[in-house]
Image (spheres, rainbow, N blue to C red):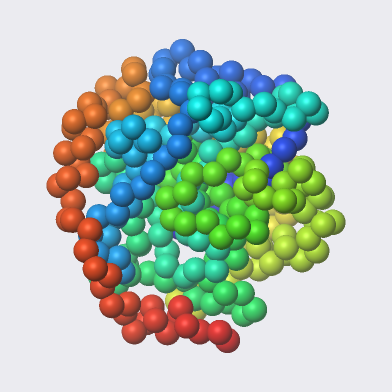
């Protein structure tokens, strides 16, 4: 998880079904047929492969396709999701959702858990790892009355908040990471799970399209009306989660208010363009590792064998390391 600067993380409030404005249709067209980068667009399910010892600094979660090809969750998983299909038969969309667009979300942290897992943006193939600070694995404290992360937390692939770009609305620079997303669905996901979501708005929140409430949540107001207190709890969590580490309360742009889904889609579109420039080496990479196997025009595209070599060079999966006393104390704390 990336800590928010003096603005909300440019993540998205996401959920299951809904119509699209012209800006959304334009985003989909750009993502699907980008003139400078061609993507392998075939819909597929993703699998994960664990390397190293869980609860240790060398633990990594790598991604691969159902065909066994290793991929980067940052660069190779498409931003725009195709409807799920089975036996190569395209899935049918609901009649009222002909313009529906779904986005892929890479889950980094399961709901109710404490370990600060994140996409390793500066490592080849960008596996998920647990963040380390001063040689110690990081855990988010329980902020009363919450337990760990209060949603499934993750990122939108093929987006990048360029630290050299100043946002016109917040006057702040990007945080050098993909866009943060929170899934407010009832399912507890697992690290490395790829789910489909739709945009509701900006401060950071999302919901799995398979969630029973997905069809009823189409805007910030829907969340506010059907889940009283949920948005306020999200703001409260992000304001205070670093306080136990001795840091001040976070401050947010927009006075902590949520912005609508059209605003969110504009942000996604902008960060997708920044990502494309990153993959083409048209901008300073700021240390980001851009190795990928599917972006055809990227000078950083590698072969499947090269990608496999990256994974095989990582430590083999082993038995879990004992959780540190600090981590155990946080994980078992029930206030």
- On the rendered image, what quadrant is the N terminus found in? bottom left
Image quadrant where residue 171 sits: top right
Which is nearer the eye, 169 or 47? 47
Percent position of residue 142, x then y: 54, 77
**For the point 76% across and 43% down, which residue is it?**
215
- 269 horizontally vs 232: left or right: left
- 305 horizontally vs 287: left or right: left
Q: Residue furthest front?
A: 87
Which is nearer the eye, 159 or 49? 49
- 105 horizontally vs 200: left or right: left
Question: In the rendered image, is residue 93 in sight?
Answer: yes
Percent position of residue 72, x then y: 35, 38
Percent position of residue 179, x then y: 51, 44
Which is nearer the eye, 193 or 158? 193
**For the point 66% across and 63% down, which residue is it?**
235
Percent position of residue 185, x then y: 65, 55
Question: In the rendered image, is residue 75 in sight?
Answer: no
- On the rendered image, what quadrant is the C terminus found in? bottom right
- 49 horizontally vs 111: left or right: left
Which is nearer the eye, 35 or 270? 35
**For the point 73% across and 54% down, which residue is it?**
257
């Amino acid at each position: 998880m990336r800590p928010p600067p003096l603005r909300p993380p440019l993540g998205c409030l996401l959920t299951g079904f809904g119509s699209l404005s012209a800006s959304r249709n334009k985003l989909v067209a750009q993502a699907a047929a980008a003139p400078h980068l061609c993507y392998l667009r075939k819909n597929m399910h993703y699998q994960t492969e664990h390397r190293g010892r869980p609860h240790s600094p060398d633990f990594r979660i790598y991604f691969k396709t159902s065909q066994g090809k290793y991929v980067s969750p940052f660069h190779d998983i498409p931003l725009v999701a195709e409807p799920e299909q089975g036996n190569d038969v395209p899935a049918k969309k609901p009649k009222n959702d002909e313009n529906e667009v779904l986005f892929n979300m890479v889950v980094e942290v399961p709901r109710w858990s404490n370990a600060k897992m994140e996409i390793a943006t500066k490592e080849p193939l960008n596996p998920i790892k647990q963040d380390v600070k001063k040689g110690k694995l990081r855990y988010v404290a329980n902020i009363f009355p919450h337990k760990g992360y209060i949603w499934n937390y993750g990122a939108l692939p093929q987006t990048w908040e360029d630290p050299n770009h100043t946002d016109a609305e917040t006057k702040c620079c990007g945080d050098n990471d993909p866009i943060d997303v929170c899934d407010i669905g009832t399912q507890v996901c697992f690290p490395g799970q790829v789910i489909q979501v739709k945009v509701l708005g900006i401060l950071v929140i999302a919901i799995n399209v398979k969630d029973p409430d997905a069809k009823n949540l189409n805007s910030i107001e829907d969340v506010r009306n059907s889940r009283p207190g949920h948005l306020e709890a999200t703001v409260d969590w992000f304001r205070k989660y670093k306080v136990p580490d001795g840091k001040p309360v976070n401050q947010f742009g927009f006075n902590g208010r949520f912005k609508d889904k059209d605003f969110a889609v504009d942000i996604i579109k902008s960060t997708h363009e920044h990502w494309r420039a990153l993959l083409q080496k048209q901008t300073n990479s700021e240390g980001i590792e851009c190795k990928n196997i599917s972006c055809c025009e990227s000078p950083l595209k590698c072969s499947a064998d090269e990608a496999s070599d990256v994974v095989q060079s990582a430590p083999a999966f082993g038995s879990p390391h004992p959780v540190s006393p600090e981590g155990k104390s946080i994980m078992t704390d029930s206030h």
